[in-house]
Image: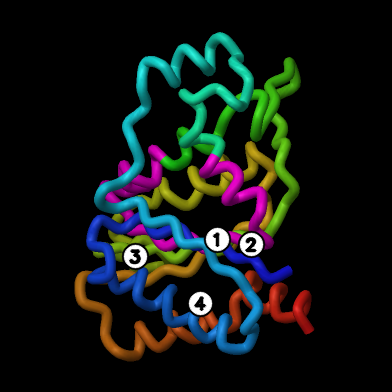
Amino acid sequence: MNHLLFVDASPHGSDSLGARLACEAIAQWQTARPHARVVSRSLGEPGLPSLSTAYAHALVARQPDSDPALACSEQLIAEVEHSGGVLISTPMHNFTVPAALKLWIDYVLRIGRTFRATPEGKFGLLADRPVLVLVRSGGICTGPAARQPDFLTPYLKQVLAVIGLSTVDFIYLEGIAPDDAAIDAVRGQLAASALLAQRATATA
């Protein structure tokens, strides 16, 4: 497979350290795969449109997927569906996902489209594919030195599993001003990640 979806949830755009590292890794991946396709979805400015009354009504009325009110949701879902893997670069805001990523999630998780609800629970309608999440946190949230809770990791695991994406890995870049060693370590983790390694095997 030669199709990667990159979702950048930072409000800092190209100034985001996490996004820059992700883009470096993607560039290296593309260099080895000249025919590969990368779709980049930036959730910063101008950002996605807010959930509208028309969208809410379309969901409740179970309108067809072609309803104009569902257009944004359909586009975002299609980007996931057409990908062979997903790379998400996101900051941790107030111990969890930033508002921009939450809005993306609200559009992608859609009953009857990406998951179905039954008396036994919710079940994903999308085929599984590898997902890699690069988390940029100003505080330390992993390991014995953790000084703040991390609600982002379990939340993303749960919401992605609901739509069928259960192969999810996380890389963390922590601290207000990470040193060169920490940054290089993240570069190495990205290069050796399961997402990129699996895709390398698929295109060999």
Q: Secondary structure at mark 2?
A: strand
- Measured in 3D between alpha carbons, the distance from the residue under mark 4 to the one under mark 1, in whole angstroms, is 10 Å
Residue 59 vertical placement versus 184 (above, below): above
Q: Quadrant of residue 20?
A: bottom left
- In the rendered structure, are the residues bearing label 1 and label 2 in contact, judged by CB atoms less than 8 Å apart? yes
Instruction: Provide residue 56's location: percent of width, then percent of height.
Output: 44, 17
In the displayed structure, does residue 138 sit left or right of residue 75? left
The answer to which quarter of the image holds residue 129 is: bottom right
Q: Is residue 201 visible?
A: yes
The residue that label 4 is drawn on is 26
Task: Say what amino acid the circle numbered 2 marks.
Answer: Gly
Residue 85 badge: 2
Which secondary structure lies at badge 1?
Answer: strand
- Crowding at mark 1 (Cα within 10 Å: few <14, some 14-19, many 20+): many
In primary-sequence order, the first of circles 2 and 4 is: 4
Marks 4 & 1, CB-CB < 8 Å contact = no
Q: Which residues are magenta?
A: 75-103
Residue 166 has which mark?
A: none
Q: Answer whether labels 1 and 3 touch (C-beta < 8 Å).
A: no
Disc 3 target residue: 136
Say if the magenta span includes residue 99: yes
Q: Amino acid at mark 4?
A: Ile
Q: Are marks 3 and 4 in contact (CB under 8 Å)?
A: no
Q: x and y percent of residue 68 in the render? A: 49, 25
Q: CA distance from mark 2 to mark 3?
A: 20 Å
Few, some or many residues within 10 Å of mark 4 (<14, 14–19, 20+): some
Q: What amino acid type is highlighted by mark number 3? A: Arg
Q: Nearer the viewer, residue 140 or 105?
A: 105
